[in-house]
Image (spheres, helix red, strand yellow):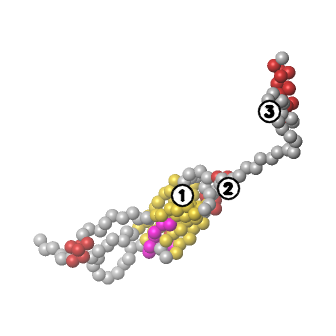
Amino acid sequence: MARTFDPFREIFGEAPRTVGMPMDLVRTGDDFVVSIDLPGVDPSSIDIDAEERTLTIRATRNTQTGEGQWLVRERPTGTFARQLTLGNGLALDRVKASYADGVLTLHIPVAEEAKPRKISVSHSGGTQSIEGDKPIEGEVAEQSQGQEALAS
Protein backbone atom coordinates (compact mmCIF):
# COMPACT_ATOMS: atom_id res chain seq x y z
CA MET A 1 0.00 0.00 0.00
CA ALA A 2 1.43 3.37 -0.98
CA ARG A 3 1.73 6.05 1.67
CA THR A 4 1.65 9.74 0.84
CA PHE A 5 4.59 11.64 2.29
CA ASP A 6 3.42 14.62 4.33
CA PRO A 7 6.36 16.60 5.78
CA PHE A 8 4.13 18.80 7.93
CA ARG A 9 2.47 15.86 9.63
CA GLU A 10 5.91 14.41 10.36
CA ILE A 11 7.00 17.71 11.94
CA PHE A 12 3.82 18.81 13.72
CA GLY A 13 2.07 15.51 14.34
CA GLU A 14 -1.69 15.41 14.55
CA ALA A 15 -3.63 18.64 15.01
CA PRO A 16 -4.02 19.49 18.69
CA ARG A 17 -7.51 19.60 20.15
CA THR A 18 -8.32 23.18 21.07
CA VAL A 19 -11.20 24.90 22.77
CA GLY A 20 -13.40 26.52 20.14
CA MET A 21 -13.92 29.72 22.11
CA PRO A 22 -11.07 30.48 24.55
CA MET A 23 -12.06 33.19 27.01
CA ASP A 24 -10.60 35.64 29.53
CA LEU A 25 -12.65 37.26 32.30
CA VAL A 26 -11.65 40.27 34.37
CA ARG A 27 -13.47 42.66 36.69
CA THR A 28 -12.79 46.36 36.15
CA GLY A 29 -14.63 48.55 38.62
CA ASP A 30 -18.36 47.92 38.24
CA ASP A 31 -18.05 45.83 35.05
CA PHE A 32 -17.06 42.29 34.25
CA VAL A 33 -15.23 42.16 30.92
CA VAL A 34 -15.30 38.92 28.94
CA SER A 35 -12.90 38.58 25.97
CA ILE A 36 -13.50 35.63 23.65
CA ASP A 37 -11.16 34.76 20.78
CA LEU A 38 -13.11 34.28 17.56
CA PRO A 39 -10.63 34.86 14.71
CA GLY A 40 -11.99 34.41 11.21
CA VAL A 41 -15.61 34.55 12.35
CA ASP A 42 -18.08 36.57 10.29
CA PRO A 43 -19.37 39.23 12.76
CA SER A 44 -22.91 38.84 11.40
CA SER A 45 -22.88 35.18 12.55
CA ILE A 46 -22.32 36.09 16.20
CA ASP A 47 -25.45 35.53 18.29
CA ILE A 48 -25.69 36.37 22.00
CA ASP A 49 -28.74 35.44 24.09
CA ALA A 50 -29.46 36.10 27.76
CA GLU A 51 -32.05 33.96 29.48
CA GLU A 52 -32.47 34.09 33.23
CA ARG A 53 -28.88 33.73 34.50
CA THR A 54 -27.42 32.09 31.38
CA LEU A 55 -25.57 33.94 28.63
CA THR A 56 -25.22 31.92 25.40
CA ILE A 57 -22.73 32.94 22.71
CA ARG A 58 -22.79 31.34 19.25
CA ALA A 59 -20.60 32.05 16.23
CA THR A 60 -19.82 30.41 12.90
CA ARG A 61 -16.50 30.10 11.11
CA ASN A 62 -16.92 28.90 7.54
CA THR A 63 -14.64 26.36 5.89
CA GLN A 64 -12.12 27.82 3.51
CA THR A 65 -12.48 26.40 0.06
CA GLY A 66 -9.86 26.39 -2.59
CA GLU A 67 -7.72 24.36 -4.87
CA GLY A 68 -5.13 22.00 -3.53
CA GLN A 69 -4.67 19.29 -0.98
CA TRP A 70 -4.91 20.08 2.72
CA LEU A 71 -1.63 19.30 4.48
CA VAL A 72 -2.41 20.74 7.91
CA ARG A 73 -5.84 21.77 9.13
CA GLU A 74 -5.78 22.98 12.73
CA ARG A 75 -8.28 25.82 12.63
CA PRO A 76 -11.70 24.49 13.57
CA THR A 77 -14.70 25.40 11.43
CA GLY A 78 -18.43 25.23 11.96
CA THR A 79 -20.68 26.65 14.65
CA PHE A 80 -19.27 27.20 18.13
CA ALA A 81 -21.28 27.83 21.28
CA ARG A 82 -20.42 28.65 24.84
CA GLN A 83 -22.71 29.18 27.81
CA LEU A 84 -21.84 31.25 30.84
CA THR A 85 -23.89 30.83 33.99
CA LEU A 86 -23.90 34.18 35.74
CA GLY A 87 -24.54 34.90 39.38
CA ASN A 88 -27.16 37.26 40.72
CA GLY A 89 -26.33 40.92 40.86
CA LEU A 90 -25.45 41.48 37.20
CA ALA A 91 -27.42 43.77 34.90
CA LEU A 92 -28.06 41.47 31.93
CA ASP A 93 -30.29 44.11 30.35
CA ARG A 94 -27.26 46.42 29.98
CA VAL A 95 -24.68 44.02 28.47
CA LYS A 96 -22.64 45.63 25.67
CA ALA A 97 -20.85 43.59 23.00
CA SER A 98 -18.23 44.56 20.42
CA TYR A 99 -16.11 42.59 17.94
CA ALA A 100 -12.72 43.82 16.74
CA ASP A 101 -9.56 42.12 15.52
CA GLY A 102 -11.04 38.64 16.02
CA VAL A 103 -11.99 39.24 19.66
CA LEU A 104 -15.55 39.45 20.97
CA THR A 105 -15.68 41.69 24.06
CA LEU A 106 -18.64 41.73 26.44
CA HIS A 107 -19.08 44.33 29.18
CA ILE A 108 -21.43 43.01 31.86
CA PRO A 109 -22.21 45.66 34.48
CA VAL A 110 -22.94 44.96 38.12
CA ALA A 111 -26.60 45.73 38.90
CA GLU A 112 -27.25 48.87 40.93
CA GLU A 113 -28.88 46.89 43.74
CA ALA A 114 -25.79 44.68 44.05
CA LYS A 115 -23.29 47.53 44.37
CA PRO A 116 -22.01 48.26 47.87
CA ARG A 117 -23.37 51.49 49.24
CA LYS A 118 -23.00 53.58 52.34
CA ILE A 119 -26.04 53.97 54.56
CA SER A 120 -26.12 57.19 56.51
CA VAL A 121 -27.45 57.33 60.04
CA SER A 122 -29.70 60.25 60.90
CA HIS A 123 -29.90 61.59 64.42
CA SER A 124 -31.81 64.23 66.32
CA GLY A 125 -30.20 67.14 68.14
CA GLY A 126 -31.49 66.09 71.61
CA THR A 127 -29.17 64.79 74.28
CA GLN A 128 -29.20 61.16 75.19
CA SER A 129 -27.78 59.62 78.31
CA ILE A 130 -26.96 55.99 78.76
CA GLU A 131 -25.28 56.26 82.18
CA GLY A 132 -26.69 54.31 85.10
CA ASP A 133 -30.42 53.69 85.26
CA LYS A 134 -31.42 57.03 83.78
CA PRO A 135 -33.98 56.67 80.99
CA ILE A 136 -32.95 57.67 77.49
CA GLU A 137 -34.80 60.73 76.32
CA GLY A 138 -37.13 60.52 73.34
CA GLU A 139 -39.08 57.58 71.97
CA VAL A 140 -36.97 54.96 73.73
CA ALA A 141 -37.84 56.38 77.15
CA GLU A 142 -41.54 56.31 76.23
CA GLN A 143 -41.23 52.70 75.12
CA SER A 144 -39.47 51.81 78.37
CA GLN A 145 -42.24 53.40 80.39
CA GLY A 146 -44.83 51.59 78.25
CA GLN A 147 -43.05 48.28 78.78
CA GLU A 148 -43.00 48.85 82.54
CA ALA A 149 -46.73 49.50 82.45
CA LEU A 150 -47.28 46.24 80.59
CA ALA A 151 -45.11 44.34 83.05
CA SER A 152 -47.00 45.57 86.14
**Can you give x and y, in whole percent of width and height, for residue 46 in the image?**
51, 68
- Outermost residue toward the top? 152
Write the residue at 84% across / 30% down: 135
- Residues under labels 1 and 3: Cα distance? 58 Å
Dot 3 surroundings within 10 Å: few (below 14), some, or many (20 or more)?
A: few
Q: Which residue is rendered at x = 57% and y = 67% of the image?
A: 97
Between marks 2 and 1, how big is the CA–CA gap? 19 Å
Q: Position of residue 145 (x, y in %)?
A: 86, 26
Query: Circle 1 is placed at which residue position?
Result: 55
Residue 56 in picture, x, y percent from top left: 51, 59
Side of 91 relative to 59 (left or right): right
The span shown in magenta is 35-44
Choose mark 2 or mark 1, whichever is in front: 2
| Residue labelled with disc 2 | 112
Q: Is 69 drawn above or below residue 94 in the view shown?
A: below
Q: Is residue 72 above or below residue 106?
A: below
Horizontally, residue 133 falls left or right of residue 48, namely right
Amino acid on which disc 2 is placed: Glu
